[in-house]
Image: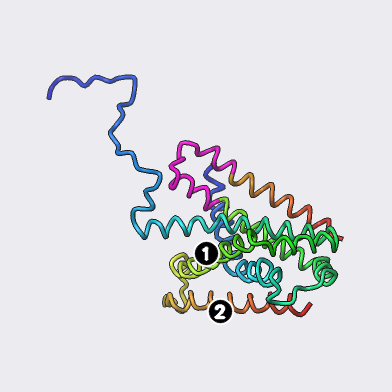
Amino acid sequence: MARPVTPLLWLLFSAGGTVAALLFPIHAFLFGLAFPLGWLEPPAHDALLGLLRQPLTRLYLLVFICLPLFHWAHRFRYTLYDGLQLKHLFGLVAALCYGTALVLSAVAAYVLWGVS
Amino acid sequence: MSAPSSYTLHHPKWFRHRVSVFWWLQKRSYTVFVLRELTSVFVALFAAFTLWQIRSAAAGEEAYAGLMARLGTPAFVVLNVVALAFLLFHSITWFNLAPKAMAVRLGGKRVPDLVIAGSNYVAWLVLSAAVAFILLAL
């Protein structure tokens, strides 16, 4: 990794960590458990789609998906270095982590753009 | 020692103990540290899960109903319970570290750690309530 990008990667890690910390638990509770298991009345499909069509919702979801992906890429990269002692694979691990985050972010932008 | 030192082409290899890949299981604080770092895996999984959900919601009512039915199966319920536990662990450790990551000064005095962590928890509560309110009012 070239030196000048390190602060940017750290910033993405930090911003993504904050987004995930603040918003992921409630989304995971509602969409992962409460709605599928019927603890709470899930929103009707057309109402959900109506919300999804709003530009502000799509912007929210883009931030919601992309920043935490870069948080993962940064943190998981160092976990692999230390936890599995993969420091010698420095370049490969970094390329795989940030590459995955980049590709999934692009897919997210594409999907959100195409909601109609 | 007056003999001139001789140089070899190769760097001498120094002795190092080989550390087990499971070094982090030997001490509780190390295990907690690695588990905290591994919360990022569930963060990425949940981001991908949300993307999948958006795709099926956009694909139509049938696709969305299919996804909801699949999420009710035991395998997904277990996965989502584990994921929620890791996500909560991430939130709590993240907010507790916030005062150490940024030292905020107001009027030349450092804002106490408890105030910074506390304001993070308040923001968490307010945002969670707002998300729940929007989704439940639909």
Q: Is residue B109 above or below residue A28?
A: below
Camera-near label (2 vs 1) is: 1
Q: Is residue A85 left or right of residue B65?
A: left
Q: Is mark 2 on a helix, strand or loop?
A: helix
Q: Which amino acid does label 1 sit on?
A: His
Secondary structure, magenta segment, majority class: helix
Image quarter (top left, top right, bottom left or bottom right) of the C terminus of chain A: bottom right
Question: Distance of mark 2 from mark 1, alpha carbons?
Answer: 16 Å
* Same chain for the residues under marks 2 and 1 in the image: yes
Quarter-of-image position of residue B48 = bottom right
- Pinpoint the chain carrying mark 1: B
Q: In this view, does B61 lie to the left or right of B108?
A: right
Of the two numbered discs 2 and 1 on the same chain, state the one appearing first in sequence: 1
* Pointer 1 residue: B90
Could you say which is closer to the camera, residue B104 or residue B70? B70
Q: What element carries label 1?
A: helix
Quarter-of-image position of residue B4 = top left
Residue range highlighted in magenta: A74-96
- Pinpoint the chain carrying mark 2: B
- Is residue B46 magenta-colored? no
* Pointer 2 residue: B122
Q: Is residue A3 left or right of residue B79?
A: left
At 58% from the left and 46% from the top, the residue drawn is: A97
- Rendering coords of residue A68 (x, y %): 61, 58
